[in-house]
Amino acid sequence: MTKRTKYIHEGRYVAEVDVNLQVDAAGWSPYLTVEDACRLDDVRDALRRGDLSAAVALARVYTLEPVAASH
């Protein structure tokens, strides 16, 4: 099992979700557990609905702001 951070971008928000990647010798690894995949979906759905309190309960959420280019 390997700990990783997955990022979800929805609108002006980015969420960091900690997940565990499962590794095995059988072939399709690494892969997410069902619980981690559901947590990623729940965070994405919460951000799409604008429910920041639900998203923050599952992940670290950040607001994106544009950066003005200077020459």
Image: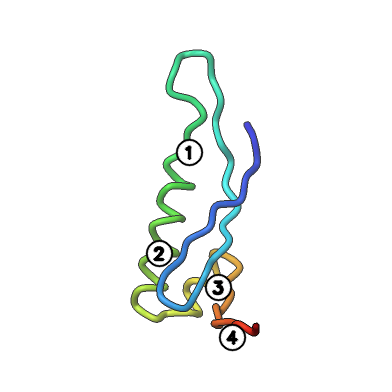
Q: Residue at x 59, y 75 (%)?
A: 62
Whether residues under marks 4 and 2 lie with C-beta atoms below 8 angstroms apart, the answer is no
Q: Estimate the spatial distance between the alpha carbons at disc 4 and disc 2, rounded to whole Å.
A: 28 Å
Q: Estimate the spatial distance between the alpha carbons at disc 3 and disc 2, rounded to whole Å.
A: 11 Å
For label 2, the SS is helix
Around disc 4, counting alpha carbons within 10 Å, would you say few (fewer than 14), some (14 to 19), or many (20 or more)? Answer: few
Q: Which mark is residue 68?
A: 4
For label 1, the SS is strand
Around disc 2, counting alpha carbons within 10 Å, would you say few (fewer than 14), some (14 to 19), or many (20 or more)? Answer: some
Give x and y (percent) for residue 18. Answer: 60, 52
Q: Label 3, on which residue?
A: 56
Of 5 and 66, the residue lying toward us: 66
Q: Estimate the spatial distance between the alpha carbons at disc 1 and disc 2, rounded to whole Å.
A: 16 Å
Q: Residue at x 46, y 78 (%)?
A: 12
**Mark closer to the observer (4, 3):** 4
- Kindly identify the amino acid type of the residue bearing the numbered disc 4: Ala
* Mark earlier in primary sequence (1, 2): 1
* Mark earlier in primary sequence (3, 2): 2
Q: Is residue 11 above or below residue 18?
A: below
State the quadrant of the N terminus. top right
Residue most extreme to the top: 26
- Kindly identify the amino acid type of the residue bearing the numbered disc 3: Val
